[in-house]
Amino acid sequence: MALQRVTIGFVNGTESLGVRLEDDALDGLLRAVAGGEWHDLTVDDGTIRLNLGQVVYVRTARDEHKVGFGSAS
């Protein structure tokens, strides 16, 4: 399973957290953000407990194009 680069931004605007997540973990995080409670995020070197009420954004490279040219519509 491929790891996705994810950046999580917080309310204070001065800090963000960069992690690499498997698709299942990323999907779980995105579902949990909607609830706004606490979420345990398992990463390659341990577990991070996030207060999702303080999360402003979750940026992922999942849908970005890495190589080649896109078609214009």
Image (tube, grey):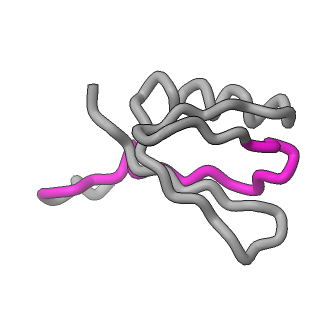
Residue 56 image offset from top left, x and y in percent:
76, 56
Residue at 71 percent across and 39 percent down: it is 49
Queried whether the magenta region covers residue 59, the answer comes back as yes
**Vertical arrangement, residue 60 with respect to residue 27, above or below:** below
Residue 54 image offset from top left, x and y in percent:
84, 53
Residue at 40 percent across and 50 percent down: it is 5
Q: Nearer the viewer, residue 4 or 51?
A: 51
Quadrant of residue 11 within the rendered picture: bottom right
Looking at the image, how many numbered discs can be counted on the residues? 0
| In the image: residue 22, left or right of residue 66 | right
In this view, the residue farthest toward the left is: 68
Q: Nearer the viewer, residue 4 or 41?
A: 41
**Magenta residues (range):** 50-67
| In the image: residue 70, left or right of residue 36 | left
Q: Nearer the viewer, residue 65 or 55?
A: 55
Residue at 40 percent across and 38 percent down: it is 44
Residue 58 image offset from top left, x and y in percent:
61, 50
Q: Nearer the viewer, residue 66 or 58?
A: 58
Residue 67 image offset from top left, x and y in percent:
15, 57
Residue at 54 percent across and 27 percent down: it is 27
Quadrant containing the N terminus in the rendered view: top left
| In the image: residue 13, left or right of residue 28 | right
**Vertical arrangement, residue 71 with respect to residue 14, above or below:** above
In this view, the residue farthest toward the front is: 46
